[in-house]
Image: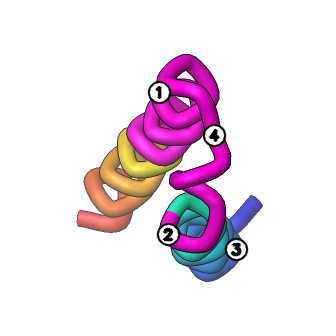
Amino acid sequence: MNEMEIRMRIASLRQYLRDFQHEMTTEQTDAVLDVISKLMQVLEELEKRKR
């Protein structure tokens, strides 16, 4: 998975959360936010390796 794919997945998950948050349980919302957080950590690590 490259940097662009990760950014696209983060954007997709954020949009999903905006669209469906009102239908989701707190646990589901937390799970999506957790995945976004983990993807952002991966992105940060990739950026560190570029330096």
Any magenta on residue 31? yes
Give x and y (percent) for residue 20.
64, 60
**Nearer to us: label 4 or label 3:** 4
- Give the secondary structure at mark 2: helix
Q: Is residue 27 above or below residue 10?
A: above
Question: Could you say which is closer to the camera, residue 38 or residue 19?
Answer: 19
At label 2, the amino acid type is Arg
Task: Tell me the number on the disc at residue 48.
Answer: none
Which residue is label 4 attached to?
A: 24
Which residue is label 1 attached to?
A: 30
Task: Tell me the number on the disc at residue 18.
Answer: 2
At label 1, the amino acid type is Asp
Which of the 4 image quadrants contains residue 47? bottom left
Q: CA distance from mark 3 to mark 2?
A: 20 Å
Which residue is label 3 attached to?
A: 5
Residue situated furthest front in the rendering: 22
- Give the secondary structure at mark 4: loop
The N terminus appears in which quarter of the rendering?
A: bottom right
Q: Is residue 11 above or below residue 17?
A: below
Q: CA distance from mark 3 to mark 1?
A: 22 Å
Q: Which residues are magenta?
A: 18-38
Q: Earlier in the sequence, mark 4 or mark 3?
A: 3
**Nearer to us: label 3 or label 2:** 2
